[in-house]
């Protein structure tokens, strides 16, 4: 499985890929709305935990826990896409992985830290301006949440994390599925040839 993941990443870096911003936003919105209550509840807890830790550690502790807490959004979004049973404690599974800077590649591809960072840089650089526009758009969505008396961020923060996950799943997940299909086709051809 790891070999398939590595080949998929190599193909993305070598051949490029399509990145549909509107599709990522649409799919991310659907992931969020499918389990809106837990996402909003976790966002409230995230803010309370982060704020409390920040008060007692002058912000340093908040920086340390933000990575694992943020990973919770991606872990649950991934479980939703895979039609797995969602349990609220899954939001805290990021603490089992602890603090990768580019969470998505490290979490789902089980790559070491530096290879994950390098792979993510190379993949994003293929569509730099598209990703730049995508993240600007996500920032504007969260700005609208702040303008809506601040309460809107309880909706926009988890929604935008789901949109980020959807973008990752579309690009990297699509490449992995394509590589898996090639492997199965090759095995089928070999089996047919043997017999």
Image (cartoon, rainbow, N blue to C red):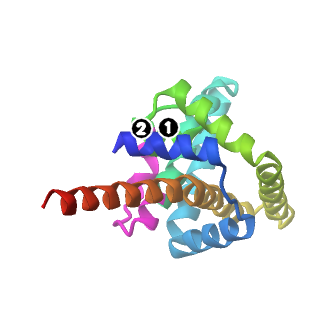
Dot 2: within a 10 Å radius of its alpha carbon, few (fewer than 14), some, or many (20 or more) residues? few
- Tell me which segment is drawn in magenta: 78-94
Q: Which mark is residue 24?
A: none
User: Which residue appears at 73% of the width and 70% of the height?
Assistant: 22
The part of the image, by quadrant, that contains residue 130 is: bottom right
Is most of the magenta stretch helix, strand or loop?
A: helix
Q: Relative to residue 27, is residue 7 depicted above or below?
A: above
Q: Which mark is residue 106?
A: 1
In the image, 104: left or right of 78? right
Which residue is disc 2 drawn over? 110
Taking the magenta stretch, the answer to whether it contains residue 81 is yes
Q: Relative to residue 94, is residue 183 depicted above or below?
A: below
Proximity of marks 1 and 2: CB atoms separated by less than 8 Å: yes
The part of the image, by quadrant, that contains residue 149 is: bottom right
Dot 1: within a 10 Å radius of its alpha carbon, few (fewer than 14), some, or many (20 or more) residues? many
Residue 138 on image: x %, y %: 77, 58
Distance CA(mark 1)–CA(mark 2): 5 Å
User: Which residue appears at 70% of the width and 43% of the height?
Assistant: 124
In the image, 123: left or right of 182? right
């Amino acid at each position: 499985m790891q070999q398939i993941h590595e080949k998929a990443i190599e193909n993305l870096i070598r051949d490029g890929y399509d990145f549909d911003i509107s599709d990522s936003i649409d799919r991310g919105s659907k992931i969020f709305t499918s389990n809106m209550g837990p996402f909003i509840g976790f966002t409230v807890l995230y803010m309370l935990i982060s704020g409390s830790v920040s008060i007692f550690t002058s912000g340093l502790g908040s920086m340390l826990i933000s990575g694992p807490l943020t990973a919770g959004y991606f872990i649950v979004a991934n479980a939703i896409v895979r039609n797995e049973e969602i349990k609220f404690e899954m939001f805290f599974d990021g603490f089992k992985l602890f603090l990768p800077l580019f969470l998505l590649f490290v979490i789902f591809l089980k790559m070491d830290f530096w290879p994950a960072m390098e792979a993510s840089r190379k993949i994003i650089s293929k569509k730099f301006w598209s990703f730049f526009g995508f993240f600007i758009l996500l920032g504007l969505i969260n700005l609208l949440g702040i303008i809506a008396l601040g309460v809107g961020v309880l909706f926009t923060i988890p929604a935008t994390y789901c949109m980020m996950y959807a973008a990752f799943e579309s690009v990297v997940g699509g490449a992995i599925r394509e590589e898996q299909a090639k492997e199965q086709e090759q095995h089928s051809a070999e089996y047919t040839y043997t017999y």
